[in-house]
Structures are given as structure tokens and as C-alpha cells.
């Protein structure tokens, strides 16, 4: 970990924006996280930077061909717009996620629908499956 706020911080070879300064506070790109926390209405909250998001996307893009962004995991309009600007598509599960992706300006041809769990994935145990089979017959 770094001793001062800096983008040169690394952890396990991965660059990140967070660091603990000599004053004992956590910083993200020269911004004291405590100050941000005191300024937000709801907690917990997510604190991210455009630069770090770009780095993360590039790292995954290099490792995985055809990386697309999951709207469910990135449901902030500004983050979605940034991901679109990086040339990413969007993975959707719901109609609301489709609306968010279109609002963020994604090309409809770069939107991908992922279907929810199959029936057997929703049933919690083998006993429930046997019970359902008896009822269904």
C-alpha cells in the first residue's frame, strides 16, 4: 500500500486509486473518503473514479475477449455512459436494465439478454423436486 494518495499504488500487481495517507485517512485520487462519506445521504455507498473504471475495463478486456458490461452491476447512468464510451456493450436481465442501457446511449445491436435461472436452479432441494414431480403428475 502507498504512503500517499497516488495512482502509482499497486496491490498484487494491479493499480488502484485508494491509499492511506500519513494523516491516517483513506484517500481516493487525492480526495479524502471521509469527506465524501459525510457528503452522501445514503450509506453504504460506492466510490469510484472514471480513471479506475477505465483501467479495470482495459485489464478485463485484455484478459477476456469481447467483454461487455452488466447493467445490474453498473446501474449508475454515468458509469454506463462511460462504459459505452469505452466501446463496451451491455448485458441485460430485465426490462428496466434495457431502459437504463438505452438511456445511457448503448447501440441496440450491442445489447445482450441473459436469461434467468432454470427451474431446477430455483428449487432449493431434492425433496422439493420429488414433491413437485408428484404434484405435476
Image (spheres, rainbow, N blue to C red):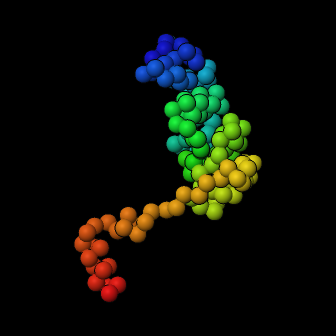
Identify whether 101 is placed above or below 36. below
Identify whether 115 is placed above or below 19. below
Quadrant of residue 81 in the image? Answer: top right
Q: Is residue 72 left or right of residue 1?
A: right
Which residue is at 65% across, 53% downward? 111
Q: Horizontal and vertical percent for residue 118? A: 43, 66
Query: Exactly how many numbered labels are in the figure?
Result: 0
Quadrant of residue 48 in the image? Answer: top right
Q: Horizontal and vertical percent for residue 15? A: 52, 22
Give the position of the C terminus as an image quadrant. Answer: bottom left
Residue farthest to the front?
65
Residue farthest to the bottom?
137
Q: Is residue 84 left or right of residue 117?
A: right
Decide which of 27, 125 is in the foreground and name it. Answer: 125
Decide which of 44, 46 is in the foreground and name it. Answer: 46
Q: Horizontal and vertical percent for residue 10? A: 48, 19
- Observer able to see residue 53: yes
- Observer able to see residue 56: no
Quadrant of residue 113 in the image? Answer: bottom right
Identify whether 58 is placed above or below 83. above
Which residue is at 68% across, 46% downward? 77
Give the position of the N terminus as an image quadrant. Answer: top left
Q: Horizontal and vertical percent for residue 122? A: 39, 66
Amino acid at each position: 500500500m502507498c504512503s500517499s494518495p497516488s495512482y502509482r499504488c499497486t496491490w498484487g500487481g494491479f493499480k488502484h486509486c485508494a491509499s492511506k495517507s500519513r494523516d491516517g485517512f483513506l484517500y481516493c485520487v487525492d480526495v479524502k473518503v471521509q469527506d465524501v462519506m459525510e457528503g452522501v445521504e445514503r450509506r453504504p455507498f460506492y466510490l469510484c473514479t472514471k480513471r479506475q473504471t477505465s483501467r479495470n475495463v482495459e485489464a478485463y478486456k485484455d484478459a477476456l475477449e469481447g467483454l461487455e458490461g452488466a447493467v445490474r452491476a453498473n446501474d449508475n447512468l454515468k458509469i454506463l455512459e462511460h462504459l459505452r464510451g469505452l466501446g463496451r456493450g451491455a448485458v441485460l436481465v430485465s426490462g428496466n436494465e434495457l431502459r437504463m442501457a438505452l438511456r445511457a446511449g448503448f447501440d441496440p445491436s450491442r445489447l445482450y439478454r441473459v436469461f434467468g435461472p432454470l427451474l431446477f436452479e430455483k428449487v432449493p432441494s431434492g425433496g422439493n423436486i420429488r414433491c413437485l414431480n408428484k404434484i405435476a403428475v
